[in-house]
């Protein structure tokens, strides 16, 4: 990896120097990432951040002529930390929704994939509200999937987790009957691993725009139009020059950008 994450001590130092603002250093762009959402972002055994989001972040920084500093942040606090100027933008598979647009601005999408349910093979579940009534569904807390489950499946018990990996572990342990998440995250992060060999998708793609928005975009603070437009231009550039395709093909055997 070309650039490492910003440590807590380094972040504190920047704040102490009054460098929390987005334009504190014209040559640096600080990107908030999660690091716990494979294959989009995760940490290797040596502690390096890798994944589709990570590669996209570095490619956009390079296109903009910026030094890219990745700042790891738990999902629950990822928007508050942006507003607190811990970093300048979020690249963390964050869906563009009306609710989030009330507090942050977004670039255009940089990918779009549907949500799906998964459960143990042969469980015989259906993904209707009636079919999952009385069942325990695992979901990552504070996500679009959490909002969707809460509204559409009122007769199911919902277990919420800080990371997607925690939901996978409870599915394996039998503490939940099913999980809902991004289809690619479940496929590459669980089903296609040894741990997920006994599990499968069930039901249809879930794409209701009211909940799942317009795809995943890059979040910036309200009013930072110059940065948002620079990121939009960089997204267009890496899609036009082949960089996006190279990153896409590194992780997926189809075009994740969507229609």
Image: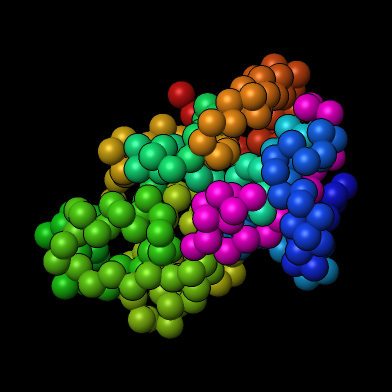
Question: Which residue is drawn at the image coordinates 36% and 81% (left, top)?
Answer: 175
Residue 12 placed where, x, y %? 76, 64
Residue 87 falls left or right of residue 82: right
Residue 255 falls left or right of residue 118: right
Q: How is the image coloured?
A: rainbow
- Does residue 75 show up magenta in the picture? yes
Q: Is residue 158 visible?
A: yes
* 126 and 4: which is toward the camera: 4
* 124 and 162: which is toward the camera: 162
Question: Which residue is drawn at the image coordinates 64% and 50% (left, top)?
Answer: 85
Quadrant of the rendered image containing residue 122:
bottom left
* 14 and 99: which is toward the camera: 14
Question: Which residue is drawn at the image coordinates 31% and 35% (left, top)?
Answer: 209
Residue 251 to residue 151: above or below: above
Residue 224 to residue 74: above or below: above
Residue 158 to residue 90: above or below: below
Residue 108 placed where, x, y %? 52, 27
Q: How many marks?
A: 0
| Range shown magenta | 63-85
Question: Which residue is drawn at the image coordinates 76% and 51% (left, top)?
Answer: 18
Residue 151 to residue 8: above or below: above
Residue 28 placed where, x, y %? 81, 40
Q: Is residue 202 visible?
A: no
Residue 101 placed where, x, y %? 41, 37
Residue 160 falls left or right of residue 208: right
């Amino acid at each position: 990896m070309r650039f490492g994450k910003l440590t807590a001590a380094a972040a504190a130092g920047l704040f102490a120097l009054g460098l929390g603002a987005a334009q504190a250093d014209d040559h640096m762009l600080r990107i908030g990432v999660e690091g716990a959402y494979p294959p989009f972002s995760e940490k290797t055994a040596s502690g390096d951040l890798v994944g589709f989001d990570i590669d996209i972040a570095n490619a956009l920084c390079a296109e903009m002529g910026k030094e890219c500093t990745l700042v790891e942040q738990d999902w629950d606090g990822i928007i508050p930390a942006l507003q607190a100027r811990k970093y300048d933008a979020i690249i963390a598979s964050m869906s563009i929704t009306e609710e989030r647009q009330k507090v942050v601005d977004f670039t255009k999408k940089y990918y779009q994939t549907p949500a799906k349910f998964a459960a143990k093979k042969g469980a015989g579940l259906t993904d209707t509200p009636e079919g999952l009534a009385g069942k325990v569904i695992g979901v990552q807390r504070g996500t679009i999937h959490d909002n969707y489950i809460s509204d559409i499946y009122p007769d199911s018990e919902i277990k919420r987790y800080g990371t997607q990996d925690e939901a996978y572990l409870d599915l394996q342990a039998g503490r939940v009957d099913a999980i809902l998440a991004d289809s690619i995250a479940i496929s590459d992060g669980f089903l296609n691993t040894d741990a997920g060999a006994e599990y499968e998708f069930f039901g249809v793609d879930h794409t209701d725009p009211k909940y799942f928005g317009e795809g995943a975009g890059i979040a910036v603070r309200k009013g930072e139009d110059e940065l948002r437009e620079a990121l939009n231009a960089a997204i267009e550039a890496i899609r036009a020059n082949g960089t996006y395709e190279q990153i896409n093909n590194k992780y997926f055997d189809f075009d994740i950008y969507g229609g």
